[in-house]
Image (cartoon, helix red, strand yellow):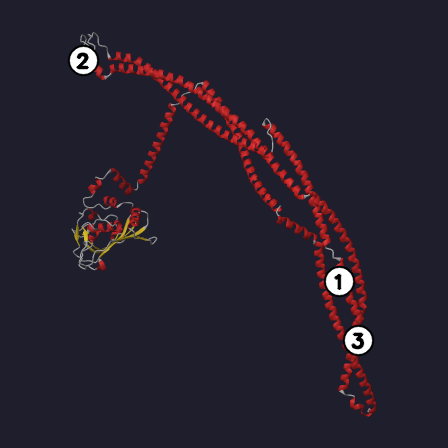
């Protein structure tokens, strides 16, 4: 942490001060002294730093926890009780507010501004003391913390020291250095690590210790395992090798069986899905079959047949409607033409009358002109005569046009009559072809109905269901046979493990007897060795040193004639010690053999229990499969034969017979479908022909209209 700037306002003996640690004289020196007379504010500077960072100060920690009435509060009659060690006591007397603001850079290289602020109500000297406002601003992000818990956590992160550690290391108040020296080793270690930055070495040491402890435990575990290991003889090794080879072979066989069973399980799962799908389709088919047998379906089927039979009538009706519409249009056209003809005839008569009048006028005019020949020049330019002449010429032109139209219509009538005769002949040919097609349709319909398609489909569906059941039964029998073989193998393995366990248990009795004997011999030899060893102890040598020849033994009372040397006692103890080592070796070997036997017995017992559990579980699956096979045989009416192979042969033969019947029914259904398609094709050809009677009637009506028109003309 690096201090940058400290601002103090109305704290203790300092009224207003700003200390810049980066500029001026302090910025040029890394070490400086705070000195001055008593009351000058030396401790106040340190208190200001502590208040800004921790909202605490060592000066108040040492004060007694006593309370007094705030004498400066005169704004209200009720005065607040304030503790002597309250940090707000540092505010100068007769002031309304005080604060300490510290700008610093934390050990995490983030610039902060810590501010501690206290004031009286309305910032008046007579106001009551308010709560402390403590804030911490991150100048890099601009985020300001106001909650005490968040500020403490961020200060701990930025400074790296708690308030107590800060007061013991960085800011040592008067008389607190002795307290630091008298701290516990763990506390001083934590403080010094944070100050010197050597905490990583403590973590490395802790990790090394943990790793060493783990390795030591592993070593002890392996050592105990080594102590329990007994070297096997060649015969035991060969036996274990043989057992390993057998187990490997059994494992290989079991793996093959597992692969086979897995394939069968997958197949059974697929078979189950297919069965469920088949049952769903069967339910749909049964629903459809039930719907086919209802009166509503029969009524609809009869309606469909009637609809198919009425196809010719519907076509004839459609043709009749079409021809009727054409006839009505022709009649309208004929009426229109007749009306137009009558109009033209009336116009022709009028024009003839006008022509006669004009001729008479012309004759009168000619006579008049002859009489008035002398006045001819006067009428040469007469516009009235010219207009009459023009009208006369226009009337003659229209008369010629009308006559030409009548001639054209009269000439077209024979051609129309000829076309009408041709159409009648075509209609007769279509009538004959339609009758032939209807006859062929009737014959093929009788042949199609003779197949009885619903009955054939029902028979085919029943045979397919039976075939599926036979295939399922055959697969179940195959699975049952494989499970039977696997069950026999598991039972043989279980019996083999059981025999090994019996052999090991018998060996345990012999090993236990040997262990007890070696233990007894070892204890006897050890007791003898301890008894003899007492003679070589220090107290025995000291007692012998006090004896002289001619004295009496203080133990047995005999007279001592000769005192042996200590080397003689040591030579007497050596053979017993060698015997003790030999007995201990035999005792350890017997214990290891017994321990290995018990371990092997435990292992074989677990294997036997696991094998028995697997056998029982497999036996349950075998029984379930067997019951399923029996249920399928009963459902399909198959009588099981002696032996699974014979039953499988019978089912295969039955399945082949069902296949032949299904193929035969499929051929018949295919023929019926082809015949039905031919019938539909013939009906379509017939529907494309017109009804000759209706068309002849329409043509007859048209012909009558033309004759009527001809008569009019």
Closer to the camera, 207 or 63? Answer: 63
Residue labelled with disc 3 = 400
Q: Position of residue 351 (x, y in %)?
A: 78, 79
Secondary structure category for the residue under label 2: helix
Image quadrant occupied by the C terminus: bottom right
Q: Nearer the viewer, residue 132 or 447?
A: 447
Asked if disc 1 and disc 3 are in contact, CB closer than 8 Å, the reply is no
Residue at 38 percent of width and 25 percent of height:
225
Q: Are marks 3 and 2 in contact (CB under 8 Å)?
A: no
Q: Position of residue 587 (x, y in %)?
A: 35, 18
Q: Is any part of residue 350 visible from this angle?
A: yes
Q: How many marks?
A: 3
Mark 1 vs mark 3: which is more N-terminal? Answer: 3
According to the picture, the residue beneath numbered tag 1 turns out to be 698
Q: Callout 3: 10 Å neighbours few (<14), some, many (20+)?
A: few
Residue that appears at 21% across and 13% down: 544
The quadrant in which residue 661 appears is top right
Whether residue 367 sits left or right of residue 87 in the image: it is right
Measure the alpha-carbon separation of dots 1 and 3: 35 Å
């Amino acid at each position: 942490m690096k201090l940058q700037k400290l601002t103090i306002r109305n704290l203790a003996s300092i009224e207003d001060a700003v200390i810049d640690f980066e500029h001026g004289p302090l910025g040029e020196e890394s070490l400086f002294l705070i000195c001055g007379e008593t009351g000058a504010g030396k401790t106040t500077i340190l208190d200001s730093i502590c208040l800004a960072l921790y909202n605490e100060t060592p000066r108040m920690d040492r004060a007694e926890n006593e309370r007094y009435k705030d004498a400066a509060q005169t704004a209200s009659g009720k005065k607040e009780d304030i503790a002597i060690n309250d940090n707000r006591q540092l505010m100068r007397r007769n002031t309304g507010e005080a604060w300490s603001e510290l700008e610093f850079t934390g050990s995490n290289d983030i610039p902060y501004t810590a501010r501690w602020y206290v004031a009286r109500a309305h910032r008046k000297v007579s106001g009551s003391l308010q709560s402390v406002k403590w804030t911490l601003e991150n100048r890099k992000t601009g985020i300001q913390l106001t909650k005490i818990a968040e500020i403490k956590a961020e200060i701990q992160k930025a400074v790296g020291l708690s308030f107590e550690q800060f007061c013991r290391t960085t800011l040592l108040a008067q008389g607190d250095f002795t307290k630091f020296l008298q701290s516990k080793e763990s506390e001083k270690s934590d403080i010094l690590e944070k100050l010197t930055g050597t905490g990583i070495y403590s973590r490395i040491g802790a990790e090394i210790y943990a790793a060493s402890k783990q390795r030591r435990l592993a070593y002890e575990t392996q050592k105990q395992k080594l102590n329990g290991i007994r070297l096997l003889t060649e015969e035991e090794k060969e036996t274990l090798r043989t057992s390993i080879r057998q187990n490997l072979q059994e494992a290989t066989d079991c793996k093959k069986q597992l692969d086979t069973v897995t394939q069968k399980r997958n197949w059974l799962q697929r078979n189950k899905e297919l069965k469920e799908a088949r049952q769903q389709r069967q339910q749909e088919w049964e629903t459809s079959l039930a719907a086919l047998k209802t009166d509503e379906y029969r009524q609809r089927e009869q309606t469909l047949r009637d609809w198919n039979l009425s196809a010719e009538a519907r076509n004839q009706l459609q043709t009749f409607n079409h021809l009727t519409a054409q006839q009505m249009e022709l009649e309208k056209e004929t009426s229109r033409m007749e009306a137009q003809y009558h109009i033209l005839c009336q116009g022709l008569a009028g024009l003839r009358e006008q022509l006669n009048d004009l001729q008479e006028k012309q004759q009168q005019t000619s006579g008049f002109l002859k009489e008035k020949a002398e006045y001819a020049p006067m009428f040469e330019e007469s516009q009235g005569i010219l207009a009459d002449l023009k009208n006369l010429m226009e009337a003659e032109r229209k008369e010629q046009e009308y006559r030409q139209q009548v001639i054209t219509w009269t000439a077209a009538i024979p051609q129309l009559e000829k076309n009408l005769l041709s159409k009648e002949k075509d209609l007769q040919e279509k009538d004959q072809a339609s009758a032939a097609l209807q006859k062929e349709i009737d014959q093929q319909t009788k042949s199609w109905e003779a197949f009885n398609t619903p009955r054939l489909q029902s028979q085919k569906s029943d045979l397919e269901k039976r075939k599926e059941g036979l295939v399922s039964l055959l697969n179940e029998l195959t699975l049952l046979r494989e499970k039977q073989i696997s069950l026999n193998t598991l039972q043989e393995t279980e019996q083999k493990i059981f025999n090994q366990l019996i052999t090991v248990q018998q060996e345990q009795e012999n090993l236990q007897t040997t262990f007890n004997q070696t233990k007894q011999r070892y204890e006897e030899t050890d007791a003898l060795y301890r008894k003899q060893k007492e003679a070589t102890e220090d107290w025995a040598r000291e007692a012998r040193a006090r004896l002289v020849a001619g004295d009496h033994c203080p133990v047995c009372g005999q007279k001592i004639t000769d005192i042996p040397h200590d080397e003689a006692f040591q030579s007497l103890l050596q053979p017993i010690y060698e015997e003790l080592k030999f007995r201990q070796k035999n005792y350890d070997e017997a214990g290891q053999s017994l321990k290995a036997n018990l371990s092997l017995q435990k292992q074989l017992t677990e294997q036997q229990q696991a094998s028995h559990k697997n056998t029982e579980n497999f036996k349950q699956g075998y029984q379930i499969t067997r019951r399923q096979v029996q249920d399928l045989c009963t459902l399909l009416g198959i009588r099981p034969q002696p032996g699974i192979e014979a039953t499988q042969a019978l089912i295969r033969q039955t399945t082949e017979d069902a296949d032949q019947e299904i193929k035969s029914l499929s051929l018949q259904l295919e023929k019926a479908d082809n015949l039905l398609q031919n019938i539909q094709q013939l009906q379509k050809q017939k529907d494309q022909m017109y009804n000759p009677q209706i068309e002849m009637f329409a043509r007859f009506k048209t012909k009558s209209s033309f004759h009527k028109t001809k008569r009019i003309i």
